[in-house]
Amino acid sequence: FEKDQPFTCTAWVKLQGNDSSGAIAARMDKPSEYRGWDFWVQARRIGMHVISNWPEDGLKVVGKAQVKANEWTHVAVSYDGSGKAAGVKVYYDGQPQPTNVENDKLKGSIKTTVPFRVGQRSAGEPLSGAGVQDLRIYKRALAPTEVESMAKLTRFAGILAKAAEE
């Protein structure tokens, strides 16, 4: 993705009850001033970095609330391609979350040649001890109703898959 291209990341996550941080998924070149993007966990708060050159040229937005420890939660982060922190939205179980803007200075390119990774950036920041399932990346910013439907339908499908007596 480039800084003017919208995208959305979604996943089911199960996070330990600690204050660790790490990338759920990323295409971020840590040795090159963190250029790229990540779908981020910070003390059980979900967020996103969109970076050209950290910290002088990048965005960082993180949900204010923590997701529950040791429970599966559907999380999503969308970016509208505006180059502004206001264009990043965070959702837990399909519901929009209030956010903390930790950086709002994106100007340059975020393109990088490092490969896409699940559970870490190009070097370091592994998301240890977490469960990740049904990771999805969309080439557009999903509408809030789409994120809500995705969280509810996936959970509903799991219920339907159980035996009647369960």
Image (cartoon, rainbow, N blue to C red):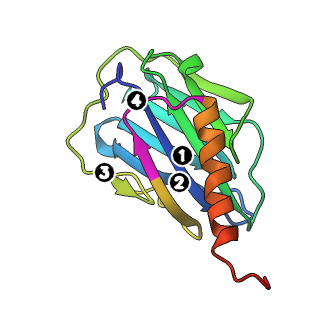
**Distance between the Cα atoms at labels 3 and 4?**
15 Å
**Distance between the Cα atoms at labels 4 and 2?**
16 Å
Residue 140 colored magenta?
Answer: yes
Would you call the spot at circle 2 few (<14 residues within 10 Å), some (14-19), or many (20 or more)? Answer: many
Q: Quick check: marks 2 and 1 in contact, CB under 8 Å?
A: yes
**Residue lying at 49% horizontally and 52% vertically, measured from the top left:** 23
Dot 4 or dot 1: first in sequence order is 1
Q: Which mark is residue 40?
A: 1
Image location of residue 57, percent across then percent down: 41, 20
Q: Which residues are magenta?
A: 136-143
Dot 2 or dot 1: first in sequence order is 2
**Residue lying at 48% horizontally and 34% vertically, measured from the top left:** 49
- Horizontal side of 164 relative to 30 (left or right) equals right
Q: Which mark is residue 51?
A: 4
The disc labelled 1 sits on which kind of residue? Trp
The disc labelled 3 sits on which kind of residue? Phe
